[in-house]
Image: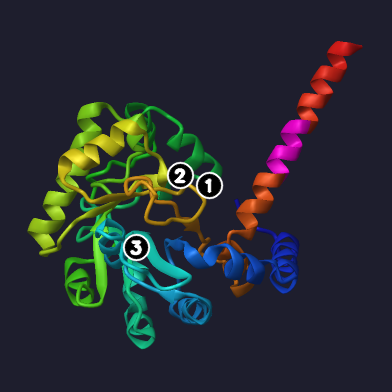
Amino acid sequence: MAVTPVKRFCRSAVFALLRFSGLPFLVRELWQRNKVTIVAYHELDAARADAQFAALRARYNVISLAHFLAASTSQPVARLPRKALIITFDDGHRSNYGLTSVIETHRIPVTIFLCSGIVGTHRHYWWLHAKDSREAQALKALPDEQRVQALLSRGHADRQEYETRQSLSGDEISAMKTIVDFQSHTVSHPILPACSLERARSEIVASKDALERNHGLQIYALAYPNGDYSDREVGLLQEAGYDCGLTMDAGFNDSHTDRFRLRRVALPNDAGINEVIVKTSGVWALLKTFRTKRTNARRHSTTHGDIDR
């Protein structure tokens, strides 16, 4: 759904107020300092990435995903820098290549999760063929076979080649892999818990195999598409030889966090600096949790009040 100028202004004002309230600073310095924060992007233009990476570097110590895993699995647990932060991108969008010079300038490690059946082709990301974000969410809620059939009725198939390219090419991946840690995001980005066991296993195993074989990558991590997973997917990752799985569950990580349920902070493509600072600190997630609890408590009170009458 399109964001109106009024909504965009209100959103910017809210995040500006929260940033300069001092709450993000307090949370970052008192609670977040001993945690590992993982942020999740999808697409950023170079100018926005330059500003946001600078803001994150000024407040956190940016480390690689591999560094965190090595430290958390060593015995005894190796010390990580205070306020450690990991930057990730999902999907492998074509625009990610435009960040090459920004990543080099800031000298920071970045992990990009690739859909192996889409990168290096002219195939499209299926959710971009939905009419709008509402329809995309509705498609994500369907059993996988129904989602595939619904998209076929709209003229989209996972293996269909289009005139335009939406993902990174093989040459772009090759050029970036000296500065970017490329990992797996399945083959075609289905919602894994909505898939049959056979389909889910194939998406997880085949992606690792294809990325290693076709692009010469070392694949040890998978980001669950849409952040959706269950115990079954965790088991499938372990069977396939992955070392970790990344979710979209809100929160931070430490050496005790389940490596196959690593938490991330989702950052929108159009987020401004204030929004990035507030959301990365965890303040936004805390406020949402508090609001949800208050809403649930109010509903509970109203329901019981109705019964009493």
Question: Magenta stretch: residue 59 in it?
Answer: no
Q: Nearer the viewer, residue 206 or 32?
A: 32
Q: For the residues labelled 3 and 1, say whether their Cβ atoms are less than 8 Å apart.
A: no
Instruction: Count residues near mark 2 (Cα–Cα under 10 Å), then give few for <14, some for 14-19, many for 20+.
Output: some
Residue at x 64% of width, y 72% of height: 25
Question: How far is mark 3 from mark 1, CA to CA?
Answer: 18 Å
Question: How far is mark 3 from mark 2, CA to CA?
Answer: 17 Å
Q: Which residue is mark 3?
A: 93
Observer-side mark, 2 or 1, equals 1
Q: Which residue is mark 2?
A: 130
Q: Quadrant of the C terminus?
A: top right
Magenta segment, which residues? Answer: 291-297
Instruction: Count residues near mark 1 (Cα–Cα under 10 Å), then give few for <14, some for 14-19, many for 20+.
Output: few
Q: Which residue is mark 1?
A: 133
Position of 120 relative to 61 (above/below):
above
Residue at x 38% of width, y 27% of height: 143
